[in-house]
Amino acid sequence: MTETGHDLAPGLRYFPDYFDRPAQEALVAAIRQVVADAPLYVPRMPKTGKAMSVRMTNCGALGWVTDKDNGYRYQSTHPETGRPWPAIPETLLALWDAVSGFAKPPEACLVNFYDPEAKMGLHQDRDETDFAAPVVSVSLGDQCLFRIGGTSRSDPTRSFRLSSGDVFAFGGESRLIFHGVDRIYPGTSTLLRNPGRINLTLRRV
Ligand code: AKG
């Protein structure tokens, strides 16, 4: 674990290589258990019902979900199985304690799986009510091109190639910055059995 992060902007902290390879493997094993209990599903955009290219699940008391009829929201159960979400793995709770600077624990952990063609458009994480808490984000598996901007959609953006084990924290003045994933670089990591990337985001809701 590397707990020295770089401040990229006020409230925006980047911890390259936070998790070493054994820690990444343990985290993937924990996420496999989450997925066994709460399977990945295809989220759909509000109103249009268009499928997102990532597949998703969650762990924690609440999970972020989206569908055609009810849109973006947090709920306490999996949209397909109806079961409560599994608990957030201990390693992620420890990560939150180490990097969030926030006393209360995370309530939600969104698990995004990107296959080599998947991407995520620039957006803000603003379905939460508590913007005092940061969002803490973990990358596992193949590298991706991660883009961040400012708090207005028209602000200039910059891009980073994120690698497996990297951690980002968006808090304070950067809590509502636009961010997204422009592409995956398949074959750049041997961590996962198949090409692709897992992203985990810890949040207070
Ligand atoms: C989100 O889940 O809101 C994200 O922006 C994920 C970003 C990532 O995959 O690094």
Image (cartoon, rainbow, N blue to C red):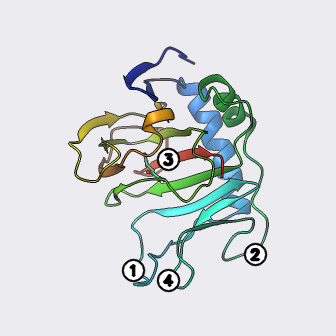
Secondary structure beneath dot 1 equals loop
Q: Which residue is mark 1?
A: 50
Please tell me which residue lies in front, 16 or 154.
154
Mark 3 Cβ and ligand 1 under 8 Å apart: yes
Q: Which residue is mark 4?
A: 68
Dividing the picture into quadrants, the one containing residue 136 is: top right
Position of 152 with respect to 63 (left or right) is left
- The residues bearing labels 3 and 1 have C-alpha atoms spaced at a distance of 21 Å
- The residues bearing labels 4 and 2 have C-alpha atoms spaced at a distance of 17 Å
- The residues bearing labels 3 and 2 have C-alpha atoms spaced at a distance of 23 Å
Label 3 vs 1, first from the N-terminus = 1
- The residues bearing labels 3 and 4 have C-alpha atoms spaced at a distance of 23 Å
Name the residue located 70 percent from the left edge and 60 percent from the top edge: 36
Q: Is residue 164 above or below residue 123?
A: above
Label 4 vs 1, first from the N-terminus = 1
- The residues bearing labels 1 and 2 have C-alpha atoms spaced at a distance of 22 Å
- The residues bearing labels 4 and 1 have C-alpha atoms spaced at a distance of 8 Å
Q: Which residue is mark 2?
A: 82
Residue 205 x/y as whole percent = 66, 52
Q: Which residue is mark 3?
A: 199
Label 4 vs 2, first from the N-terminus = 4
The amino acid at mark 3 is Asn
| Nearer the camera: disc 3 or disc 4 | 4
Q: Is residue 58 above or below residue 177?
A: below
Dividing the picture into quadrants, the one containing residue 7 is: top left
